[in-house]
Amino acid sequence: MTQPPRTTPETAPADSPVLRLGALEVGFRGQPVNVLDGVDLEVSAGEILCVVGESGCGKSVSAMALMGLLPPAHTRISSGNLTFDGEQFDLTRQTLPPRLRGGRMAMIFQEPMSSLNPAFRIGDQIAESVLQHQGGTHASAMARALEMLRRVGIPAPDRRLKEYPHQLSGGMRQRVMIAMALANDPQLLIADEPTTALDVTIQAQILDLIRELRDSLGMACLMITHDLGVVAEIADTVAVMYGGQVVERGPAAAVFENPQHPYTIGLISAVPRLDAPGGRLATVPGSVPPIAAMPTGCRFRNRCPFAADICAGKPPLAVQDGGHAVACHFAPLEQNLEVVA
Amino acid sequence: MTGTILKATNLTRHFGGGGFLSETAPVRAVDGVSLDIRRGETFAIVGESGCGKSTLARLLMRLLAPTSGTVEFDGAEVTTLEGNRLRDLRRDMQFIFQDPFSSLNPRLTVGRLVGEPLEVHRPDLSARQRREKVAELLTQVGLLPDHMSRFPHEFSGGQRQRIGIARALASGPKLIIGDEPVSALDVSVQAQIINLLGDLGRDLGLTLVIIAHDLAVIRHMSDRVAVMYLGKIVETGPAAEVFDSPRHPYTQALLASIPSPETRSEGRKARVQGEMPSPTAPPPGCRFHTRCPHAQEDCRTVEPKLEDPGTGAHPVACHHWQGIAAATGAQAVPKPRNETAEARFALYRAATEGARLEKTKKTETT
Ligand SMILES: Nc1ncnc2c1ncn2[C@@H]1O[C@H](COP(=O)(O)OP(=O)(O)OP(=O)(O)O)[C@@H](O)[C@H]1O
Ligand SMILES: Nc1ncnc2c1ncn2[C@@H]1O[C@H](COP(=O)(O)OP(=O)(O)OP(=O)(O)O)[C@@H](O)[C@H]1O
Ligand code: SF4
Ligand code: SF4
Ligand SMILES: [Mg+2]
Ligand SMILES: [Mg+2]
């Protein structure tokens, strides 16, 4: 039964990313401008990558594309490749093998009610997913469902198994979603705004839970959020998106303490701080344009206070020290620009 | 000019439940709230979803009648106002809604939307004067007079919130209540609206009542704050005091729940278990006792009153606050950025404030 160790050159080294997403370009039919303009992301085992950016920047579409969930009839995927656990997939046809989805690669969606079926009991829904990916008996699947509910901290889990989604509070539903996603021991968890709809005390409980599960299961986690506080607390690595482009990415400490991209700097400056009350906040001028009106080249250039002619060309995502990468023609800003008195 | 502008005494609002023979218990949305809002200040009401913030706001505005209790605006009891006095109240107190998308009539132009309150409250203005006033209001909130002929759907979320603010300002109010006025907005746009409200409050001498669940937004905007839990105020005082030395276990838990980089290394300080109970059956005694890490026997039976302890401390409704160490601040100060990063932030701020920049980039040279 022992298999010889795989020695093919394609085999990934142990510390290589679980997931590597490359050159993802996605448009929607009837819209000439692509919604995603070359998105690259990677995340390793035991790592939490946070994808952060404002509404409409393409966070959810990126996640849907890498799960192979975009409807081919409505989308135009001109390029995109995925390496998952050493295996390569072409994303342009959105035909990921079903064994991956919900099994080794699990997702928690932005709107929990949309992925829980209101007509079925919680326990049956979790058990169904377990049966589909691991087989076994209904009884063993239900036992697994119970174990998972207990694991995510749901009180009286045996009673909850028999309840319907509408009988649960928002926080409980989100726990059920996590229990369902983790029931098949995924290598990668994709969580789209898992705490956005929740109160801050409940959010804290869910973030603790995700962190604890990551620690004990060693899974990779791609978490989507627009909340910089959440990113600062939980992320190991960060990717900042704007207008369908990754404009900056790197270790969380580097991105927060030493941000390079004008958009990242603007976002961080715009968040009110608990320790520095009052005064005017620095802002990002204007607002995100509709996708059809996105400028070419650097898509941030109609809002960027530093924009110049050169910005009509797309800046490459240039890697600096320690895997910190930034896509701006003028980075590092303090060396290339100065205020004239 | 100073002194109280809006005063609530024992304000209570229950929903449903019917008479005393009814089977179903009422929702105790607001239960015995007393407040003093001072002229010219920004007062914030904070608490988790369902604690009664919006109900309280609507009671203060007289958009909803209280089950019991009173509201006084500028010294007059508002629940009994009628006719002209009621119209004056509507002029003096305005509302900004959370959702800029649903709060504006999509069939009206911006000119009509902002002009409408002027028609009611400034009948003395001619059509031309009204147009000029609308143009002035639009400019005041950072829009253009040209926007008058456009419809709400042509604007972004932040711009729609500006339209809502212009509309609220049109009648020349003394006080504006904003129910989550920035929480539907993206962070970059949210900062613009926070700045705008701050500027207007100061320039026009407005009193602002801000309802929000984002504690950092509240800390940034407000002078004084009230923390609500299950229909009651549990702690109130100057924002700096409440945030820097929170005394009520619930306030401490709220502040400790705010995500921050420090939590990653140190773990959470005051973790609060469980969820807020239903307001149809609030726990007896202290309503927070089911989740409070400091609860003792008396907390389950005796309700703590929100009393001013004097001696420089701020009011807190907890039997044991003196024995519970005041939590240290909301959040440890984030790591200082290094000099180069700091220079970059300064450069960014200068550039957004209109400083001229020289491009010194030497891409082609060497
Ligand atoms: N099915 C679709 N058809 C057409 N356009 C779409 C579709 N789904 C998304 N888009 C567009 O793609 C862009 C990116 O959307 P996406 O949902 O990924 O944003 P997001 O970053 O997740 O935003 P949010 O923070 O609001 O969830 C948006 O401009 C959106 O309008
Ligand atoms: N018209 C109504 N009829 C019945 N119950 C109501 C009504 N309005 C509010 N409630 C209930 O009163 C309680 C307080 O609601 P309220 O909207 O004031 O809370 P909130 O603090 O504004 O919450 P959120 O942060 O979610 O906006 C809730 O339990 C709510 O369900
Ligand atoms: S490339 Fe140009 S427009 Fe884009 S962020 Fe850099 S300076 Fe601004
Ligand atoms: S009164 Fe008791 S239960 Fe209530 S907050 Fe104080 S210690 Fe906690
Ligand atoms: Mg999304
Ligand atoms: Mg509300």
Image (cartoon, helix red, strand yellow):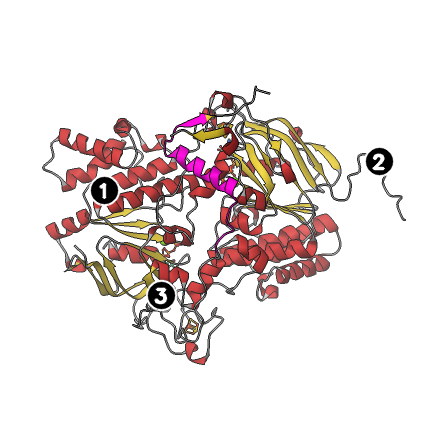
Along the viewing direction, whichever of A204 and B347 lies nearer the viewer? B347
Disc 1: which chain? B
Please identify the residue farthest to the bottom as the structure is shown. Answer: B297
Q: Quadrant of residue B322?
A: bottom left
Q: What's the residue at 15%, 48% (across, down)?
A: B87
Residue B169's label in the rendered image is 1
Along the viewing direction, whichever of B32 and B326 lies nearer the viewer? B326
Image coords of residue B301 (percent x, y)? 40, 78
The residue to which callout 3 is attached is: B235
Query: CB atoms at circles 3 and 2 under 8 Å apart?
Result: no
Query: From what the image shows, is residue A332 above or below residue B67?
Result: above
The span from disc 3 to disc 2 (Cα, nearest Å) is 65 Å
Please provide the residue range marked out in magenta: B333-358
The span from disc 3 to disc 1 (Cα, nearest Å) is 31 Å
Type of the residue with mark 2? Thr
Disc 2: which chain? A
| Residue A222 forms part of the magenta stretch | no
Please identify the residue farthest to the left as the structure is shown. Answer: B124
The residue to which callout 2 is attached is: A8
